[in-house]
Each structure stands twice: as C-alpha cells, then as structure tokens.
Image: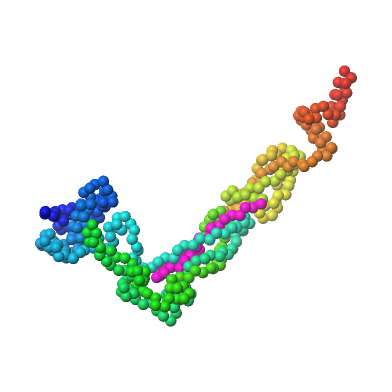
Amino acid sequence: MNKPDYYEVLGVDRTASQEEIKAAFRKLARQYHPDVNKEDPDAEERFKLINEAYQVLSDPESRALYDRFGHAGTQSAPSADPFGMAENLFQMFFGGGATLTRGPIDGADRRADIEISLEEVLHGATRTVVVERLRLCARCKGTGAEPGTTPERCPDCAGSGRVRFTQTTILGTVTRVMPCERCRGEGEILRTPCRECRGERLARQRDTLTVPIPAGVEDETAILLRGEGDSGLRGGRDGDLYVVVHLAPHPRFKRRGDDLATQINLTYPQLALGDEVDIETLDGKVSLQIPELTEPYTELIVPGRGLPNARTGKRGDLYVRIGLKMPKHLTDAQRNLLRQYAELSGVRLKKYADAEPTSFFEKVKRSIKRED
C-alpha cells in the first residue's frame, strides 16, 4: 500500500520552512489527537500518520533524504524528536511533565497576621511580627555542601540536570527529556552535604521583623515587605512577606471607613430640655451640645474626630447615637412628678386611673364630682 505524501499529510508546500511545518503539525495534532476525538475511530490512525510525517519533515537530514528518495529514503533515517524540542505529545497539548530549567528560582512569598487597636489606626504604630521562612543556609551560604567541600558535576547527566531517552509507543518513536534522578535536575551532586541544611541550600528559621503601621490603615490590609519571604536560588529573587492587618474590637467605638460611631445614653430631662455633656473620643474628651427635644436614636456629629484617611490624612467624623437612659428605680416624689407630667400632657395612665389625684386641679375636679 502506497503511503501518502508527507507534505500533503501536513498540508504544507514542499518549500515550507521548519516553522511552518511545526505550526501545521501542532494544529493537526491537536485536531486529531485520540483523546480529543474519542468518537472518531479513524482519529488514531490519522494522528499516527501526522506524527510520522512530522518526524521525517522536522529533521533536516531525514527531510533531505525524503525529498530525494521519497519514502524509501526514510527507512534508515534517524528517529527525530517529533516537536523539535524535549516534549512529548501529551506534555505539549495537555500539560504535565517536569520542569527542566536550571535557571533562577524565585523564593516563595510568606504571610503573617497581626491585630491592632483603633488607637494605633489613629496615630500609626510600629509592630513586630514573628515569621517562619526558608532562608539561605548560614553554614554553607546556599551551596548545599559542607564548608570546605564543593559540589561535583553529576556523572549521569554530565552536569546538564537532564537525561534523554527514547520510547516506542503506538504513536511512534518519541524522545523525552526528564530531570536527572540522581541529581534531581541540579546537575551537581553533594558528596558531603551541609549538616545544617542537609544539602537543601535553604534552612528554616524563625525571625522577628519590624512592621510599620501607617495611620488610617484599613482592616484586612496587606502590608508588603519586599524580599522578606523565602530566599531565591541560583540568582532568583527573594520572596515577599505580606503582613495582613486585622482590627481588634473596641469597647466604645465602631469603625465606618474613616468615620467612627459610638453611643451615649441620656435621661429624659436631658433629651427634652437639652444639655451639654462631655463625651470620650479616641484622643480625649470633647463637649457635645444636646438640642432641646432630641429624640432617642438620633445621631449627632462631632466633626474631625474620626480616623485619618490613609491617602490624604484628613480625619473623618465621630457619629454619636443618643440613647434613652431609664432609671433603675423611682422615688415617690419622682413618681408623682411623672404622673403630673402625664396628666399635663393629656396622657391617661390606666394604672393610676383610680388612684388618689396628684395635682391641685385634679383634686378640685374630684371634689366637685363628689358634691354632685
């Protein structure tokens, strides 16, 4: 059975560049991969043919033989990496596989949490935080080798950190590159590992760091300390530390953005007649005017006694909610005065409807009724 022309299989001209051949193969391989076309019984055969064509045309030597002798010239052609790079089909289209780079490795970021008070939000503060992180081993200076010794080049991968092997699968011959198991992809082996970090280059340590808390900081804000996370390797940058600020509950005030809210309870005479009272703020006492006939649950504003804005520094306001303070007990004199107030207000208290009158006018009215 005659095999189809490999250029036609990939849908490219005979003068196509290597990049055009690679691009055509990527497109077709994704389209006809058996894992994508599970319902198509011909997908696997089609995919094998696409892979076969690419193996030949992606290698300049095997392509030259094919152009000169046709399929007969490919019988002795060397097996080619089907991607022109160290990846297999599944890694290329569906992810997976190990990272083969031996370049810089950035350190991981770390997080710490602290709780602060409203007073610290108002004025700003400096706090300390204890953080556990991986830093370059102080004993070996990050080499992984015991001081006085040096790492040796891995004999299995010749210092490359990678090993190459060829597999024959139903998809054809596939060349794969994997991290060297002996040196774990490092390209070096440690005959005498550092006894502090055991050759890991990084050592876990517990450090106390100073954290500046800016005035006006908001709840759940993350303060960034650059370079205070885990150490990088091979020239990689150190990770960062994110200190997340949590606002502790306050016994008197609640936060509303840059504003604060509190509540004071006043007696009925103070609400009805008005008054001047001293109230606590985060930074001292202030005088608050209570207007006459203030209703319970009214909010009065004390300007500029809130929290500073983290960007502008301008302070918010203090909102004072007015509550009604009820007495725990009444004297007879107080009770009589309240009954008189109720009578003058036209309020009939059923509890005292048949009781002895408390006012002069009520007494006169009752005496007239008795005479009638």
- The residue located at (60%, 58%) in the rendering is 116
Q: Nearer the viewer, residue 244 or 171?
A: 171
Which x, y percent locates residue 82?
23, 60
Callout count: 0
Q: Nearer the viewer, residue 214 or 230?
A: 230
Picture layout, residue 141 above or below residue 91: below
Q: Indicate whether residue 331 is drawn in magenta.
A: no
Extreme residue toward the left, this view? 69
Q: Indicate whether residue 240 is drawn in magenta.
A: yes
What main secondary structure does the magenta stretch of the protein show? loop
Q: Nearer the viewer, residue 18 or 186?
A: 186
Which x, y percent locates residue 338?
79, 35
Which x, y percent locates residue 24?
22, 54
> Can you tell which quarter of the image residue 207 is in?
bottom right
Residue 165 visible in the picture: yes
Quadrant occupied by the C terminus: top right
- The residue located at (12%, 59%) in the rendering is 71
> Can you tell which quarter of the image residue 232 is in?
bottom left
Picture layout, residue 351 above or below residue 275: above
**Relative horizontal placement of residue 294, taking residue 16 as reference (left or right):** right
- The residue located at (63%, 47%) in the rendering is 261
Picture layout, residue 280 above or below residue 334: below
- The residue located at (71%, 41%) in the rendering is 324
Residue 171 visible in the picture: no
Extreme residue toward the top, this view? 372
What range is drawn magenta here? 224-251
